[in-house]
């Protein structure tokens, strides 16, 4: 996993809780991660879903690797909004409409590739409808 990345933090937490005998091998970049996986230095590469999916599809050295068919952790995102309740409600309503609507597919694929479709059901399931927003 990428040294200092979200996946590294998540994996460290999971391994600590699980009390298993697994050695994490931090890498400096994605090229090193792919090389180590191909050369057999490591048994798995834990990383951001979009990155791994793109690499498996574009790097012929990874053609025989198995990519878990869905993400195992989500990336938390936030938007800082000034202390204005009307603005906050407007932003939340707009985001809710986008995240629960059909245009999410177009946005997700445009910015994150086909792999993003695997996240859509999760995103939509945790996004409240605009009429339920505080």
Image (tube, grey):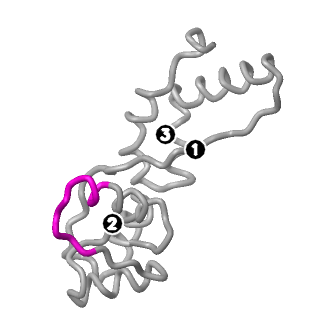
**Label 1, on which residue?**
77
Instruction: Bin the neighbour count of mark 2 within 10 Å (Cα to Cα): few under 14, some 14-19, many 20 and up.
Output: some
Query: What residue lies at 66% left-to-right and 24% top-to-bottom?
Result: 92
Label 3 residue SS: helix
**Label 2, on which residue?**
46
In percent of width and height, residue 35 lies at 34, 87
Tag shown at residue 4: none
Tell whether 63 sits left or right of 126.
left
Query: What residue lies at 82% left-to-right and 26% top-to-bottom?
Result: 83
**Label 3, on which residue?**
105
Q: Which quadrant holds residue 39?
A: bottom left
Tell whether 14 sits left or right of 75.
left
Query: What residue lies at 72% left-to-right and 27% top-to-bottom?
Result: 91
In percent of width and height, residue 81 lies at 77, 34
Decide which of 80, 113 is in the foreground and name it: 80
Tell whether 69 sits left or right of 57.
left
Label 2 residue SS: loop
Q: Using the numbered discs, state the Cα–Cα distance from disc 1 to disc 2 in whole angstroms.
A: 20 Å
In percent of width and height, residue 55 lies at 39, 72
- What number of labels is visible? 3
Query: Mark 3 or mark 2, which has the lower sequence index?
Result: 2
Q: Check if residue 120 falls in the magenta segment.
A: no
Bounds of the magenta segment: 14-23
| Tag 3 near tag 1, CB within 8 Å | no
Decide which of 60, 47 is in the foreground and name it: 47
Residue placed farthest to the top in the image? 131
Residue placed farthest to the bottom in the image? 39
């Amino acid at each position: 996993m990428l040294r200092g990345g979200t996946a590294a933090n998540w994996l460290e937490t999971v391994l600590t809780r699980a009390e298993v005998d697994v050695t994490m091998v931090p890498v400096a970049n994605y090229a090193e991660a792919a090389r180590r996986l191909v050369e057999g230095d490591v048994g798995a590469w834990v990383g951001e879903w979009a990155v791994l999916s793109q690499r498996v599809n574009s790097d012929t050295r990874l053609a025989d690797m198995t990519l878990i068919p869905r993400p195992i952790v989500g990336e938390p995102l936030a938007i800082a909004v000034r202390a204005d309740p009307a603005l906050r409600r407007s932003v939340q309503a707009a985001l809710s409409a986008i995240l629960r609507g059909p245009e999410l597919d177009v946005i997700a694929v445009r910015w994150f590739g086909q792999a993003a479709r695997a996240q859509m059901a999760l995103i939509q399931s945790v996004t409240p409808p605009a009429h339920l927003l505080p």
